[in-house]
Image (tube, helix red, strand yellow):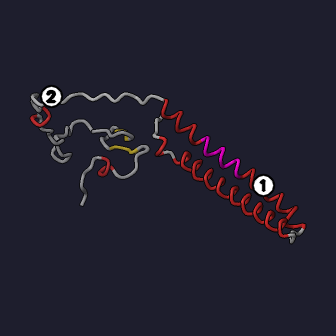
Amino acid sequence: MFNKSLTRSIPYWLLLALSVASAAVGGWLVWDNATTMQTTLLDGTATNVEVYVGQAWITAGAAILGAGVLGVLLALVLAAAKSLIPAAPVVVEPIDWTADDDASDDAIEPAPDAAEAPTDDDEPATEEGSVATEDGSEDQNGSSGSIATARKISVK
């Protein structure tokens, strides 16, 4: 299982940011329409739109505000649950500074070049995908390129 930090999780931050945004928009809708309705009702200048449509906007804003608050609480629950899960133990082995470095003593020898490699002229060499015929020539079954390319021979 891939154990990623919660602070590095994009879905977690999306949940938190969108929840805060939803709570802010819902709160603004409720506050704005409620204050507008209250001031117009107290002044005696309230119209049907401000009273009846304002109530619908307050209800919608309350639902959006509630969803945002619920999302923020869910993000907090996820953070608390993630902190309760124990992290995998990290095994650190001590370095033995007194040991000889055998890796530097063993030099890697380069592979011999294909042109310098001895070839046996008595037996035709068969590459993968080529078939040796009785007269010593090779047919290339399923191989792309020429025989010189298959044998890595420079043809000029």
Q: Residues within 10 Å of mark 2 (few under 14, many from 20)?
A: few
Residue 122: x percent and y percent?
21, 36
Residue at 47% x, 45% y is 7
Disc 2 element: loop
Residue labelled with disc 1: 60
Q: Please, what is the dominant secondary structure of the magenta stretch?
A: helix
Pick the quarter of the image with the C terminus. Answer: bottom left
Specify the quadrant of the image occupied by residue 38: bottom right
Disc 1 element: helix
Residue furthest toward the bottom?
45
Residue at 46% x, 35% y is 3
For marks 1 and 2, the one nearer the N-term is 1
Q: 145 above or below 79?
A: below
Residue 40: x percent and y percent?
82, 68
User: Magenta segment range?
Assistant: 65-74
Residue at 85% x, 62% y is 53
| Residue 89 appears left or right of 124 | right
Residue type at the position of mark 2? Asp
Residue labelled with disc 2: 96
From mark 1 to mark 2, how far is it between C-alphas?
68 Å
Residue 144: x percent and y percent?
40, 50
